[in-house]
Amino acid sequence: MARQAVNRTGKAKRPHMALVGAKTLLQLLLLAIIIFVFILAALSVLNRTSAVNAEITAVQQQIDSEISRQQAIEQSINYQHSISFIEDIARRRLNLVYPDEIIFIMND
């Protein structure tokens, strides 16, 4: 029969070595699981960041559109308060003219 090495306490070393290997394997497995969980969390954060960035871009486009619309409205308001607009309405809708103007009417 083969003899097993004995440590100071009189116990065989082989079962202890198997226990150390199993413990190391368990630690590596737990480390792999922890790394996997962190990778999943990081991917989730990146995905959410991407979605938020897309939403920010969409909202910025809406803001730009509304700014353009606001500028067009302001230009319209400024025109409607101008003498040119009042004169244009008086000529087209009310058929008014200045006293020194000569009107030519053409019949077809």
Image (cartoon, rainbow, N blue to C red):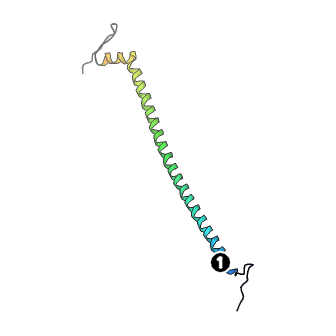
User: Relative to 62, does residue 28 appear above or below in the rendering?
Assistant: below
Amino acid found under the numbered disc labelled 1: Ala
59, 104: nearer the viewer: 59
- Residue 33 lies, in percent from the top left, at 57, 64
Give the quadrant of residue 29. Answer: bottom right
> Taking 22 as reference, is 8 left or right?
right
> Taking 96 as reference, is 6 left or right?
right
23, 47: nearer the viewer: 23
- Under tag 1, what secondary structure? helix
User: Relative to 48, does residue 97 appear above or below in the rendering?
Assistant: above
Work out which quarter of the rendered image holds the C terminus and state it.
Answer: top left
- Residue 102 lies, in percent from the top left, at 32, 10
Tell which residue pokes out farthest to the top in this image: 100
Q: Residue at x 62, y 74 (%)?
A: 22
Q: Residue at x 39, y 15 (%)?
A: 83
User: Relative to 1, does residue 57 appear above or below in the rendering?
Assistant: above
Residue picked out by circle 1? 18
Q: Residue at x 35, y 16 (%)?
A: 86
Tell which residue pokes out farthest to the front in this image: 9
55, 91: nearer the viewer: 55
User: Relative to 105, does residue 39 appear above or below in the rendering?
Assistant: below
